[in-house]
Image (spheres, helix red, strand yellow):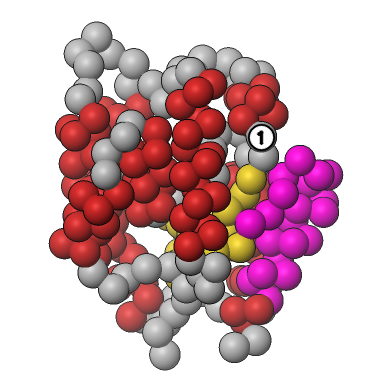
Amino acid sequence: MRGRFISVEGIEGVGKSSNIAALVGHIESAGFEVLQTREPGGTPLAEDIRDILKDRGDEPIPEVAELLLMFAARSLNVNNVIIPALENGKWVVSDRFTDSSRAYQGGGRGIPLATIDGLADLVHRDTWPDLTILLDAPVEIGLGRVSKRGARDRFEQEQHEFFERVRECYLQIAAMEPERFAIVDTTRPLADVRQDVIALADLLLTK
């Protein structure tokens, strides 16, 4: 049987890492093998691209170049990691997927969603998550959490207005695709958020 594919999305500071850890642990406790990955990244070469995208170097990265680098890394991750795992019956949990490109390069940078979806069709066709969990919080809360981490990468240095556009785009996509998306409010205590995330996984586990 093909494995299930879950992506976890959201702006910076919404608690993706801690909730992904709980999600993976819960699925494994149900007896399934889980492959955890991230985007950009997931393979050695894709991780090199991640370093380029996250670096705060002197040379600017144009919006289109940023988008193409994202999809280059995604192509490596999808073909070399995600699809083989799913075909072998493993569950895949990914920290971000194409919806991040829609929100960040689309909503944030202003690249038309039709352009992004065209690249998605070229790169991974019908390989989409069975479930996308959107961890949501107001931008000021997310950025407030990020400010406590220390040095910020190239994306984390963006202005408040950028993240407002990103968040709004995420919410619009979720509204357009309610059969795939589930929104979880992360302004609540972590235990409550994790309980909701695990409950969403249980819906897939029982299908």
Q: Quadrant of the C terminus?
A: bottom right
Query: Quadrant location of the N terminus?
Result: bottom left
Q: Which contiguous range is marked in magenta? A: 183-202
The part of the image, by quadrant, that contains residue 149 is top right
Q: Is residue 198 magenta?
A: yes
Q: Which residue is mark 1?
A: 138
Task: Using the rendered view, name the quadrant where residue 197 is placed.
Answer: bottom right
Residue under the image location 52 percent in, 41 percent down: 168
Residue at screen point 53% across, 73% down: 179
Relative to 28, is 66 above or below? above
Relative image position of residue 71 (x, y in whole percent): 23, 48
Residue 79 can be seen, yes or no: no
What amino acid is found at the position of numbered circle 1 in the picture? Pro
The answer to whether any part of residue 139 appears in the image is yes
Does residue 203 appear left or right of residue 181 in this picture? right
Instruction: State the SS at label 1.
Output: loop
Front residue of 109/42: it is: 109
**134 left or right of 94 in image:** right
State the residue at coordinates (34%, 65%). Answer: 82
**Measured from the top left, where is residue 176 in percent x and y?**
48, 62
Q: Residue at x 78, y 61 (%)?
A: 195
Work out whether residue 63 or residue 189 is closer to the camera in this orientation and state it: 63
* Residue 183 screen position, x and y as percent: 63, 57
Picture layout, residue 77 above or below residue 160: below
Q: Nearer the viewer, residue 70 or 45?
A: 70
Residue 186 in the magenta stretch? The answer is yes
